Amino acid sequence: MSFSNLTRRGLIKTSAVAGAGLALPTYLRADGHSGFTNAPTGSTVTLGFNVPQTGPYAEEGLDELRAQELAVQHLNGEGDGGMMNTFSSKALKGNGILGKKVEFVTGDTQTKSDAARASAKAMIEKDGAIMINGGSSSGVAVAVQGLCQEAGVIFMAGLTHSNDTTGKDKKANGFRHFFNGYMSAAALAPVLKNAYGSDRRAYHLTADYTWGWTQQESIAAATEAMGWETVNNVLTPLASTDFSSYIAPVLNSGADVLVLNHYGGNMVNSLTNAIQFDLLNKEVNGKKFEIVVPLYSELMAAGAGKNVQGVIGSMNWNWQLQDEGSKAFVKSFGEKYGRPPSNSAHTCYVQTLLYADACERAGTFNPCGVVEALEDFEFDGLGNGPVLYRGDDHQCFKDVLVMKGKENPSNEYDTLEIVEVTPRAQVEYAPDHPMFAGGELGKCNPGA
Amino acid sequence: MLGLKKHDTQLLIIVICLALFAPFLLNPFPADSAMAQFNAGYPDLMQRFAIFGIFAIGFNLLFGLTGYLSFGHAAFLGIGSYSAVWMFKLLGYNIIPGMILSVIVSAFFALLIGYISLRRSGIYFSILTLAFAQMLFAIAYSDLIGRFVGTPITNGETGLQVYNSDPQFFHSAAKPDIPHLFGQKMQSTYTLDVGAWSFDFNFGYYFCALVLIGMFYLAIRIFRSPFGLMLRAVKSNQQRMNYTGLNTKPYTLAVFVISGMYAGLAGGLMASMDPLSGAERMQWTASGEVVLMTILGGAGTLIGPVLGAGFIKYFENIFAKINDNVLHSWFSFLPDGIENFMVTLVHPFVGKGWHLTLGLLFMMVVIFLPGGLVQGAEKIGATFRRKDGKSDDAEAKAAKQRNPAAE
């Protein structure tokens, strides 16, 4: 079935095509880049905001996007400047970053690692983004952080709470302002002990990915240290929307506390299911049944409505804080969008400012310069009190809020109340803590 | 040329030209203009065009030739990706071992799934393949094997990736820390600036493109071989084939495995361009996507699946990026009220709503061009060409063959 009537013309055609095919890659070896990836050449600099606009964390993502837009406005000197006025570093002048006007592009992570990498890649390759910010879901954050390390751009993590982000998956080009599972556990344990006693049996439902795993590990370790017993830990797929089949066995397990290591839409659904089973009105082992949601957010509380009343959890920041930075941020966010910002919005806003400030202080957009400027940077006035960006693992250390669902909310945003502000010293840990061991930062990568 | 008839040679040359000049063809607008939004010539998307082209060509070998509609082909794509990443983890970042293993492992799985699924045909075959794919997806998504053996195999939702602490047996400090081909990095890009235009020549893309051309050539040879003829016979009437005493099973199983290997190769390439493998790429939606690509482009035609893959990936990446800000800037020349009205009108069809646009286009193609985009091109071509009753056109014939009722 082969046609081997080789003609002169055919031979020339074939060899020309083959030659062109072979020659092109060789030609490509001449790498055209210099300096670092996406070095801004014109009068503008592009930041990439990669947030979930669909999927279980979409609500958080959209709020992050609002905050990022606001941050860009403030950097460019529009609006009232927000937290730039209260920030302890005064390098930002409201004329963009290093005199270049800030522009931004957005992408949808779909709360999926694959899609998030694709949209981050598009922003880096097509739109020339020099920094990627965002990523609700630690799976996404870890995936995008790895990509940024390879591509040679800075990754300013948004909402990601897994120990792994700055633990075994930490990268030199990645930075996290948000707190993590270990800190939540360290802050929650004493409060839980006071509220529910030291003799409890806990049943964990855990989102089946890096965040769920590490948070569950942290909470279990902290609560067991104060005398609780962990009855069972059931992993639930992130894409689940109905948790009834996971809740039903809780009743027969002999547990008297249900720990929901769920976030976003997952948590809203699982908590609602738990309330439908009337868990909170049950008595087990002679004690009132309780539910704990280790990682809280205003958006989840709003989504779960009345169900969160009395439920204890932790947060990175809350709009009810009364320091100057928080007040300034809540004011400018509220004026623009007519609602208070969530803690995911806050962390993205702060991360964008911190990146801009680091560029100003380093005097360059070069990722290696930025990394140097951010490592062991101490600052204040961004809503969390004095904060340290630790150089060993690129994790921020600050106070942690313990929250409780309000019994009588006065309006739709007034759903949570602050129970305790856990001081920074109580949630600190060594960089080589076993829960964070296994990874290494590597070297900063400026790209091509 | 290369043992092909004149017409097939022309098709091959078209594909070669499209593949090699893609950086120019896909970046027709100056980099700073408002239309740059529609440029698709950046490395990541071009790589996707080539990779999904390979995936769709492979799928079309099965669906286009035998008519067996597999609804679980993404499973092989995922298996290929995981195999490749595991090779990166164990051996090092050179992509060759990864690609070889991805083809072997996906062939093994295709043999297994095909052996069982091919006992049935029609809708039952589709359901069986779908069931297998969903099982594999669930296994990967919750890392059931990993839980069983105690070490992550697919790493669940987080996705499998390479860590500095991995063994990487052949890796040394001198070699790049990202996927490479004998030292040449996949992500290295040469940017050519011509006036206002900017063109990206990416090594990874050209590697994918060369594989695509090779796979396209292989597909032509399979289409035109006696083996291909036998598969077409299976499509037109399998029962009659069986009654004549011919056992069709080995043929269908062989093409199922070949098709699975194509998918595995595409998966391996995907991991080579971006060394992370997530379970989402084996979900049923991904399997459905390749069916759409093939039908949209023209099932049973040679070039159709490549066009369909490009079409869908373009929509997914370009239309999905148009947000309200962009819309406002487009309609900013209109008075405020009309501007907002226009934005509201267009909004559901772009950004998150790109699926809606794609769905509408898909409906129109299926209704008006049952032979896919290839048939559309034929129709346009026929309008401009002089009427030639003897025109020996394999593509149009294949389109007719796929759906005789359409004529």
Image (cartoon, coloured by chain):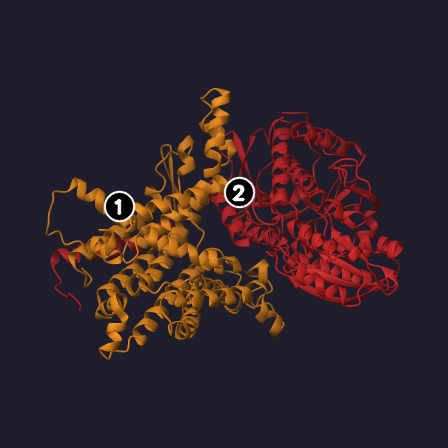
Q: Is B154 placed left or right of A227 in the picture? A: left
Indicate the amino acid at tag 2.
Gly
The chain letter of the orange chain reads B
The chain letter of the red chain reads A
Q: State which chain disc 2 sits on.
A: A
Q: Quadrant of the N terminus of chain A?
A: bottom left
Question: Picture quarter containing residue A415?
Answer: top right
Q: State which chain disc 1 sits on.
A: B
Question: Picture quarter containing residue A88?
Answer: top right
Indicate the amino acid at tag 1.
Gly
Residue B294 image position (x, y, % from top left): 34, 55
Q: Residues within 10 Å of mark 2 (few under 14, many from 20)?
A: many
Q: Is A71 placed left or right of A20 in the picture? A: right
Residue B187 image position (x, y, % from top left): 45, 52
- A288 over A317 or under it: above or below: below
Residue A95 image position (x, y, % from top left): 61, 26
Q: Residues within 10 Å of mark 1 (few under 14, many from 20)?
A: some
User: Of B196 and A261, which appears nearest the observer?
Assistant: A261
Residue A69 image position (x, y, % from top left): 60, 33
Q: Is residue A70 visible?
A: yes
User: Of A76 and B397, which appears nearest the observer?
Assistant: B397
- Disc 2, disc 1: CB below 8 Å? no
Disc assigned to residue B376: 1
Tag 2 residue: A107
Foreground mark, 2 or 1, reads 1
Farthest residue in the top direction?
B335
Q: Is residue A24 visible?
A: no
Q: Secondary structure at mark 2?
A: strand
Q: In the image, what residue occupies the spot 24% across and 68% down?
A: B233
Evaluate whether label 2 is on the same chain as label 1: no
Q: CA distance from mark 2 to mark 1?
A: 33 Å
User: Of A34 and B402, which appears nearest the observer?
Assistant: B402
